[in-house]
Image: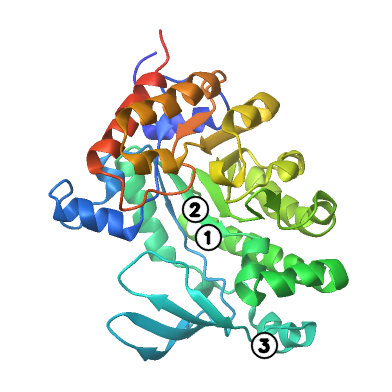
Amino acid sequence: MSQLTGIERVGRILKRQKVDRSAVCEAFWTETIRRWTAEGHLSADESPVTHFNFDLANFNPFRLMGDYLQPKKVITETDEAVLYEDGNGVLQKRLKQTTNVPQLLSYRVKTQADWEEYIRPLLEPIPDRLNLEGYRQAMEQAHGAGRFFFASSMNVFELLRALCGHETILMAMALEPDWIEDMVQVYAKLIVSLMETLFAGAGKPDGIWFYEDMGFKGHTFFSPDMYRDLIKPAHSLTWQFAHSQGLPVVCHSCGMVEPLVPDMIDAGMDCLQAMEVKAGMDLNRLYRLYGDRISFIGGMDTRVLLTNDIRAVDQELEAKIPVVTGRYGYILHSDHSVPSEVDYATYQHFVQRGLDLGTYKA
């Protein structure tokens, strides 16, 4: 087969159709890019997507905060950290010089009454909730380089977590399911309405990429029954709308989510991204169970990259890529993102060896 463009390659991989090789993409910590730039491997302001010639790009045009006009109200700021309240009324502290999960200090929405007073009335699908110009530019740049372009967004569980925190949401899933049903339906309908406006005003992407972290180490955050009753209907609404527009759906989920995968497939997921090894996810096992129905992105243990041991990196790649490329449905990626301790030479070898193993013979 002749060499394909990224648009052609990723499009075929998401349908598990014959391709020339696996595709490749990646996420990096800010410090990783800063370090590699300081070491002279990347030019100033050079995108790793361009540097490594990745096959896909994505852009999030959706403004889904309650108060999207003021998504970050700074309370105090120093050289080391910033304390701010986001557009959902969540008080957060974030360190400036490192990639980090912010410290979440307090939530405005703790009850159904809070939701109905502070947030629900704000979630109208008005065009200003979309960054149309940024989306147009990102899609034009991606297509100009032959890259498959995803519109990306948080989906309903990730939005609830960001609004109320895990403890409130998980307790409500058990004790106040009617409140959860209302929130997920409001957010799902908002996402669908904004997708309609986005596609009409700025054109369709090549696919949709949803972020939806639903697990932690060894376990899902909620049972498969709770997923089916409370989250799956919203996933079906958003994912099937994408399908109605001819667009494949990638779902990113950190943590252990294997028990949810059959229902996620039924809801309309075309590809699962991440497969976090340290959480208990096993790429080869998932491939054996579901590789005839979905494609996969990721699943390569980042902890192996952290060793900077080329032999160990080769062993990780050789144990998985010959298996998961069997039905053409695999895109090379770590199981999360690349930390700054990973040497440039290690990552460069990871890509080169991974694509060597993922190249199909004529």
Q: Quadrant of residue 179?
A: bottom right
Q: Is residue 129 above or below residue 359?
A: below
Look at 61% across and 56% down and name the residue there.
213
Q: Position of residue 69 (x, y in %)?
A: 48, 82
Q: Residues within 10 Å of mark 3 (few under 14, many from 20)?
A: some
- Residue 218, how many percent across, how many down? 67, 48
Image check: 62 left or right of 6? Answer: right
Give the mark nearest the N terminus, 2 or 3: 3
**Label 2–label 1 contact, CB within 8 A:** yes
How far apart marks 3 and 1 lie (CA) works out to: 26 Å
**Which one is earlier in the sequence, the residue at label 2 or at label 1?**
2
Spot occupied by residue 14 in the image (x, y as percentages of width and height): 55, 32
Residue 37: give its label.
Answer: none
Q: Residues within 10 Å of mark 2 (few under 14, many from 20)?
A: many
Q: In the rendered image, which quarter is residue 148 located in? A: top left
* Rendered view: 3 above or below 80: above
Residue 198 is marked as 1
Left or right: 208 as drawn, with respect to 23: right
Residue at 28% in and 31% down: 349
Instruction: For label 1, count other residues whose C-alpha is less than 10 Å away and answer few (under 14), some (14-19) or many (20+).
Output: many
Q: Amino acid at mark 1?
A: Leu
Up the image or down, 4 lies above or below 99; here it is above
Q: Residue 64's spot in the image, x, y percent? A: 57, 71
Q: Which residue is mark 2?
A: 151
Q: Which residue has dot 3 on it? A: 118
Contact? badges 2 and 3 (CB < 8 Å) = no
**Closer to us: 104 or 47:** 104
How many numbered tags mark residues here?
A: 3
Label 2 sits on what residue type? Ala
